[in-house]
Image: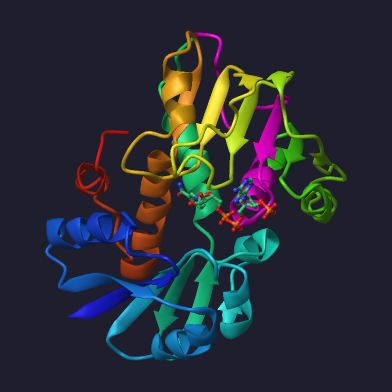
């Protein structure tokens, strides 16, 4: 039996073990996915233990996605551009870092049924998109949206961090722009919540009128207030964080095992349908 670990803090309520263990069971693979609560000062030791023969690799989550890069033997190009690793593959004693969040984000948007016929295409092109948050997830989304030719704004609680993120990302000479947190009418086509706001029942956009696409990355058992409000608003297409979670997990599964992920078995292990 081989193991795959989830390294982060907190990880107790993660939905990833249920999804990956359902996938291993579906394919009859003798592997086990286990959450390992890991404090900052335990990170280097835990990463080193991934070099054991009976470990296939790991997922890395908050708060270690960025700090883990320096502990790996190799980091794939896309993960390096994003500046964050969420998946590690152990190849013998070598540890290779990948980022599957960007793939998960794009796949969730591509596969989401549209609520209005004019919501065509994704990953959008030449649309105006506002990202809330300036952490690792915001960075993966901003890169994807810029690569697809969109105009990207970034608003963050700490505006200096939004400005720094905007300056550090560039695609064909284009950068995102740091902007104020939105209130009232937003003059954008889509908004992406890349903060944890919503986990504890708060509406991250309580003072704003919703645009035609609402993408909430927060992956929770219960729908967030933003997702609930968007679903109750005519003609708004909503992408739920659980959908991104599913697709990033499928890609990670394929990196560890080398076989196609059983997507429906993984979807069925989620607490609600997406
Ligand atoms: P980071 O810790 O790197 O960044 C968190 C961001 O959220 C920062 O911009 C921070 O602002 C902001 N933030 C945190 N708390 C608050 C608050 N109380 N009020 C306003 N802003 C706040 O996290 P990640 O970027 O990795 O993750 C962000 C979210 O995306 C999480 O909820 C995570 O679960 C989700 N996610 C979902 C995935 C999925 O598959 N569905 C994949 C990856 C992430 P500041 O800079 O001011 O501190």
Give the magenta part as a residue range: 117-145
Q: Is residue 75 left or right of residue 250?
A: right
The C terminus: image quadrant: top left
Determine the residue positioned at 31% across, 90% down.
53
Determine the residue positioned at 81% across, 56% down.
168
The question of residue 144 being in magenta is answered with: yes
Determine the residue positioned at 69% across, 50% down.
134
Quadrant of the rendered image containing residue 5: bottom left
Q: Is residue 232 above or below residue 59?
A: above
- Residue 164, percent from left and from top: 82, 55
Q: Is residue 231 left or right of residue 101?
A: left
The question of residue 124 being in magenta is answered with: yes
215 or 119, which is in the foreground? 215
209 or 140, which is in the foreground? 209
Q: Is residue 91 above or below residue 24?
A: below
Q: Is residue 212 left or right of residue 37?
A: right
Q: How many marks?
A: 0
- Residue 22, percent from left and from top: 18, 56
219 or 22, which is in the foreground? 219
- Residue 111, percent from left and from top: 42, 31
Can residue 200 be seen here? yes
- Residue 170, percent from left and from top: 81, 50
């Amino acid at each position: 039996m081989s193991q795959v670990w989830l390294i982060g803090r907190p990880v107790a309520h993660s939905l990833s073990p249920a999804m990956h263990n359902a996938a291993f069971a579906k394919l009859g693979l003798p592997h086990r996915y286990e959450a390992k609560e890991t404090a900052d000062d335990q990170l280097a030791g835990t990463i080193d233990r991934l070099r054991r023969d009976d470990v296939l690799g790991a997922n890395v989550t908050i708060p270690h996605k960025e700090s883990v890069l320096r502990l790996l033997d190799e980091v794939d190009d896309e993960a390096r551009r994003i500046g964050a690793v969420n998946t590690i593959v152990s190849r013998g004693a070598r540890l290779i870092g990948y980022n599957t969040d960007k793939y998960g984000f794009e796949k969730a948007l591509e596969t989401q049924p549209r609520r209005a016929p004019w919501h065509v295409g994704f990953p959008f092109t030449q649309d105006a998109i506002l990202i809330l948050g300036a952490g690792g997830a915001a960075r993966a989304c901003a890169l994807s949206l810029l690569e697809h030719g969109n105009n990207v704004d970034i608003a963050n609680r700490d505006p200096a961090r939004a400005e720094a993120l905007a300056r550090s990302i560039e695609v064909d000479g284009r950068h995102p722009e740091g902007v104020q947190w939105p209130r009232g009418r937003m003059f954008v086509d889509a908004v992406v919540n890349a903060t944890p706001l919503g986990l504890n029942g708060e509406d991250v956009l309580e003072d704003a009128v919703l645009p035609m696409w609402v993408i909430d990355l927060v992956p929770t058992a219960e729908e967030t207030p933003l997702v609930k409000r968007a679903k109750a608003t005519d003609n708004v297409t909503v992408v739920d964080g659980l959908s991104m979670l599913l697709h990033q997990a499928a890609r990670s599964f394929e990196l560890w095992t080398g076989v196609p992920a059983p997507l429906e078995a993984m979807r069925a292990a989620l607490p609600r349908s997406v």
